Every structure is written in structure tokens, then in C-alpha cells.
Amino acid sequence: MKNLRHQDPYLPGHGDRRYAVRHYDLDLQVAVVGNHLTGTARLDIEARTELDTVELDLRGLSVRKVLVGGKTAPRWRHRSGRLAVALPAKLKAGQSTTIEVGYAGNPRPVPGIHGAAGWEELSDGVTVASQPQGAPSWYPCNDYPGDKASYRVRVAADQAYRVIGNGVLKDTERRSSRTVWTYDQREPMATYLATLQIGRYAVLDLPGRGKGGPLVEVYYPARKKTGVVKTFARQREMVDVFSRLFGPYPYPVYRAVVTDDDLEIPLEAQTLTIFGLNHLEPSWENERLVAHELAHQWFGNSLTATRWQDIWLHEGFACYSEWLWSEHIGRASAARAARVHWDKIDKLPKDLVLAAPGSRLMFDDRIYKRGALTLHALRVKLGDKVFFEMLRAWTKARAHKGVDTERFISHAEGFAKRSLAPFFDKWLWRKSLPDLPS
Ligand SMILES: [Zn+2]
């Protein structure tokens, strides 16, 4: 793979940092029965350096045509999940063009060291959960989290099904036996956060939308209404509480989709979280997941790590949000949760560096818990007032942008008004577990 040096070492074979996609326009026809997808993707791209070819990620689907700037591409080659497109003329840094790809096939998840991810057939529908490597299973993309773009996605599917996508539903249109759904995701989105959920879903609009607050909805199999009402009873309150703690909710809408199958783990797509039937049992375990996934809308989706090694900036923050929710509802305080989890991970092997765990350990539970402990220790150090001001300023300054560990450290130091190098060094860069301040 000749462009390896332009890729994220945690996900080799994906992405190309030599250009950025500004906008994706996807026109898709989906046959749920038979699991067939026909698509046209139009990508507005901008060169970051001089370019004569562009490489896109697309796996397991056949490319039928490629246009550049509206004209047939001089050459293209699709091999090992990479679509290399020759440009008719070189692009200089800052110059733009449009690439259009026509493609089709039977989409399936992309295998990876953490398991398969991406487009998946359900018993009667489709789910897409792409973190980290699954986006190329259903559309051609520049698949790395540092390249965020706006999206417009139009999907034609059999009218028996509801199609749920990212962002705002702009339009539904009946065409004979099909319905065409158009979603607009204006705020930039990383490729792995793009999703489609297709199924026979009912919808529940959670009341209490305040001025400027998002539309909050839950999509679910109709027979599961009782479980859904119980599980998501406090979803609106959670949005309000986190908006106070972290700053305004970053999107006009927040949806939860409960698929008609069990899912191993829920997953946060942008403006939309995917749960399984198994997440409807009333328990703290499921309530904390509802809080965790919602918090990702700020930490991970609006503020996205540009490198996978910085995944603690997503998972540590989302895990700490569970503890904050626990504190809010009068369950264990965050300090108590921190003590319990410090004791637990103190008994585990100390072989993980939080800010550079390596690709195999990037979803290790210690990333979540030690990340949350780091934030709790920082809260104790700064005091509640400064800590939460710092968090709100973080989500404001970097809204819809990329983030990394170094940037977070300097942001926190700005609020501490002193160097926090020794503090972050021991929490982020050393394997041994620092003492928990109280
Ligand atoms: Zn998470």
C-alpha cells in the first residue's frame, strides 16, 4: 500500500491524509430482502498537497463507474478495498474537484482485529455500526477520523420499512412500492459515525423539548413499547443535565434506535445511538449505557479524535459521564465510582499507556475506566467550578472539529493557569496507576 505513511497506524489500509472530503452526497437504493445495495456517491474533495491520484476506501462492493469533475476518470483501479482514481489533471494544495462513484453489491461487515464492523443484515432490516473500520462496507470514503465532512444521504427502500439516518430528516417521498428518505447531516461527521438503520420501527417523541433543545426520539419494534418507555424515561432529562455540564447539545436531533435483535454493545453514531433488544432490561447497567452513548455526542462525535490512539478522549469522557449521571440521580457519587474503579483496575495488569495504547488495546475497558479516572483526578485538582468551565470551553472551542491529547492538555493548562505536565505525564503516558486524589 504505497500511501501507508498517509494513514493512521492504528488502522492501516484505510484513509488518505493527502486530501480532505468536504461533502458526501449519497444516493442509495436498498433491497432489504436479498440485502442488495446500489449507490451513487458524490464526494467534494480538496487537495492538501499536490495530487495526481486519489485513494478511497470501498470494500466488498463492485464499482461500476467513476467520474472526476463530471467526466469519466482516465483510469481507476479497485483492489483490496482501495479505489485508486487517476485525476485528469494534477490538483494543487487547496484545489477542489468532485468524484462520483457508481457501485453495487451485497454489503457485509468489514473484518478487523476488534471484530467485524459496518453494514449488517438483521433478521428483518439493516444496521450499520462502523467503528472503527466499517464505513467502507457501504460507501466510498476517506476513512480516517481526522477527515470530517457534511453529508446528504438519500435512501430508497421498500415502503414497509423505516429508514433512519444521521442528522435531520428533510423529506420522505413515496415512489410506487418504495419510500425515498432524505437526511441532511450538516455538522461535519467522521466516516465511522455515518449510519443507516432500516427496520419496521415505531417512533416515540420524548416530550419536554425546551427552547433551543434538540428533538429527542426513540425508534423501536412496536411490541416493545413498555420496555422502551421505561428504559428511555429519563433520556430527555439526561440531555438537559449533560447540556448544563458540558455545554449545549451539539445537534438539532438525538435519536436512539432499538433494533429488533440483540446487540453485543450499543454504539454511538452521530445524532443517533444504536441499542439492541437486550438493552431494554431495566438495570443500572443499561441506564449507564444510555448515559454513556449520549455523552459521545459531545465527546467523540462533535469533538473527534483525529488519531485513533487518542480514543481516551472519547471513551474516558463518556465513561466519566456515566459517573456524573450516577451522581445526579443520587446513586454513587463520581468520587465513589472513581474509588471503586481505581480498586478494580489496580488489580489488573499495568501494561497500558492511556494516550498511546496500541491498536489491540484501543477498546480495552481500562481505556474507559482509566480515562474517566484521569478526568476525576483533574476535577479534584482544578475544583468543580474550574473543571466544568474547562469542559464547557472545550466543547465550545472544538465543536465539530478534531482533537488530540496534546490539545486537551494545553486547554486544561489554560484553566489551571500552570503547567500540568507532571499530572498528565503520570496519568496518560505511564503504565503504573497513579494514586487517586481525594
Ligand atoms: Zn463509548
Image: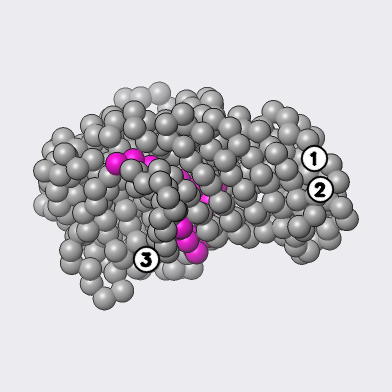
Q: Which residues are magenta?
A: 182-200
The residue indicated by pointer 3 is 252
Q: Identify the amino acid type marked 1.
A: Trp
**Looking at the image, what colour scheme do you see?**
one colour
| Residue 22 in the image: above or below residue 289 | below
Query: Does the rendering let one see residue 342?
Result: no
Q: Which mark is residue 76?
A: 1
Q: Residue furthest right?
A: 89
Picture coordinates of residue 136, whole percent (x, y): 58, 38
Q: Amino acid at mark 2?
A: Ala
Q: Are marks 2 and 1 in contact (CB under 8 Å)?
A: yes
Distance of label 2 from label 1 (alpha carbons): 7 Å
The residue located at (51%, 44%) in the rendering is 29
Query: In what element is the residue under mark 3?
Result: loop
- Left or right: 120 as drawn, with respect to 6: left
Mark 2 = which residue? Answer: 73
Q: Is mark 2 within 8 Å of ligand 1?
A: no
Q: Is residue 1 found left or right of 141 in the rendered image?
A: right
